Image (cartoon, helix red, strand yellow):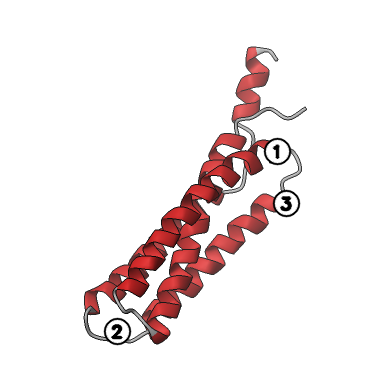
């Protein structure tokens, strides 16, 4: 591939999934911070559920936008995102254990676990996309 072709490939239009997935992580961080601010008392769950829903919608929108890409290094994306997901499953498992160990229960546990699930998905998608977007596909 010639230098102009490489520059054109690196500058091709891709959906704004990085910004969407970072926004999803920011919404999750806001929800967790909101819940943590009430500890050890029970927090009103409305704002946390709203932030969780917004984070899930934004994450899903990024997935849909990326899935519509035809000219993309899907094999490299799956490889990188898969291994990163494995690491984040272990991390999420340890955090979930801490929730249960600290006697978090009921609706708060459900909301925190759901937020943890979104937290577990966004970084592998980000890392996989960041690597695969610069891979040339034939």
The residue to which callout 2 is attached is 43
Residue 73 in sight here? no
Mark 1 vs mark 2: which is more N-terminal?
2
Which residue is at 49% across, 63% downward?
Answer: 118
The residue to which callout 3 is attached is 68
Which residue is at 32% across, 87% downward?
Answer: 44
- Nearer the observer: mark 1 or 3; the answer is 1
- Nearer the observer: mark 2 or 3; the answer is 2
Whether pointer 1 and pointer 3 mark residues with C-beta atoms closer than 8 Å, the reply is: no
Quadrant including the C terminus: top right
Which residue is at 29% across, 69% downward?
Answer: 33
Q: CA distance from mark 1 to mark 2?
A: 43 Å
Q: Is residue 2 above or below residue 62?
A: above
Quadrant including the N terminus: top right
Q: Could you say which quadrant of the image residue 2 lies in?
A: top right
The residue to which callout 1 is attached is 75
Q: CA distance from mark 1 to mark 3?
A: 15 Å
């Amino acid at each position: 591939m010639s230098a102009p072709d490489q520059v054109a490939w690196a500058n091709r239009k891709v959906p704004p999934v990085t910004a969407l997935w970072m926004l999803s992580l920011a919404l999750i961080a806001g929800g967790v911070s909101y819940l943590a601010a009430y500890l050890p008392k029970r927090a009103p769950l409305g704002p946390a559920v709203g932030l969780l829903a917004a984070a899930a919608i934004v994450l899903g929108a990024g997935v849909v936008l990326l899935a519509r890409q035809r000219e993309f290094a899907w094999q490299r994306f799956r490889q990188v995102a898969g291994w990163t997901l494995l690491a984040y499953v272990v991390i999420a498992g340890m955090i979930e254990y801490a929730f249960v160990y600290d006697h978090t229960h009921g609706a708060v546990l459900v909301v925190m676990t759901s937020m943890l699930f979104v937290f577990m998905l966004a970084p592998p998608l980000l890392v996989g996309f960041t690597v695969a977007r610069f891979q040339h596909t034939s």
